[in-house]
Amino acid sequence: MLGSLEIGLYNTTGTTAQAWGLEVTGATRSAFLIQASALFTPMLAAVGGQRLTTNAWLGSALGLAGTLAVVGDTTQGGAGFGAGVSGGDLLTLGAAAAYSAATVRIPVYARRVQPLQLALGKSLFLGAVSCAALGLQVQQHQAHLWDGWRDGWQGWAAIAWSASGPGALAAYLHVQGQSSVDAVTAQIAFSAVPLWSALLTALLLPGDSALGPLTWVGGGCMVIAGVVGVLPPKPTPAEAKK
């Protein structure tokens, strides 16, 4: 129960902040910014007492450089350094921090209980909060969900897919994977998020994919950060001799 509540709280906070940020930030830009978890995950792991390698700290530095580069890009919804960071950027970075907290804490519980139990528990927490928020929204807006919600099945189909695929299935696979690997190692898989998002956005939302060079450079730094952060440390002379 404690694991479900804690991980569910991180997941709910991250999902809410990311969805809110996507209202003002493009999908591809958001995918690059969410990769700031390459910076947050090692830092939170260190705070939790995990001993990090030099490569992990180097990966964190690259993640920070990548995040600053993406935030400084003004091409797609970004305010740039001169105008300050946009609200959508801050919300997405907050989501990255929440997801990183979940990544760090999941192994603590996933090694004690069945991964399916933990995934189910955190999903139930997220579902309960989401239903409560939906109820408040419907009450305040007199049953108004979004423009054209009665006009077709496409919107409801997208919601159903989001709940079953990226929602339930991803939650189970995430917990199952982290039952055997630590948080920093898991980060290498998440480093591919911007690449998949850019590809899917180009296919499904072609008008959203206009990115400036700073975003691509920053995204590249984040991907490299995720890989560098999990490279094994250089063996000492004694270890190399063995």
Image: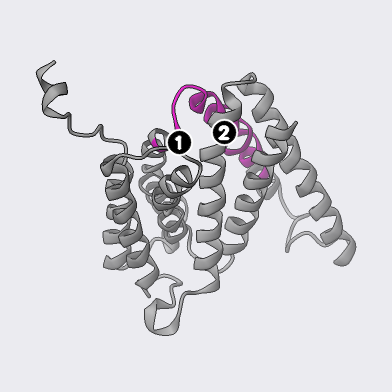
Q: Is residue 20 magenta?
A: no
Q: Residue at x 50, y 74 (%)?
A: 86
* Residue 183, disc: 1
Circle nearer the N terminus (2, 1): 2
* Residue 20, disc: none
Q: Is residue 167 magenta?
A: yes
109 left or right, relative to 237? right
* Relative vertical location of residue 76 with respect to residue 55 in this rendering, above or below: below
Q: CA distance from mark 2 to mark 1?
A: 8 Å
Q: Which residues are magenta?
A: 159-184
Q: Secondary structure at mark 1?
A: helix
Q: Quadrant of the C terminus?
A: top left
Q: Residue at x 45, y 80 (%)?
A: 84
* Relative vertical location of residue 61 with respect to residue 118 in this rendering, above or below: below
* Relative vertical location of residue 133 with respect to residue 116 in this rendering, above or below: below
Query: At label 1, which amino acid type do we have?
Result: Ala
Name the residue beneath numbered marker 2. Answer: 106
- Residue toward you, 172 or 228: 228
Tell me where residue 124 sits by quadrant: top right
Query: At label 2, which amino acid type do we have?
Result: Ile
Q: Secondary structure at mark 2?
A: helix
Q: Main secondary structure of the magenta part?
A: helix
- Residue toward you, 71 or 202: 71
Q: Residue at x 26, y 35 (%)?
A: 231
Answer whether residue 24 is visible to the viewer in this image: yes
Tell me where residue 87 sits by quadrant: bottom right
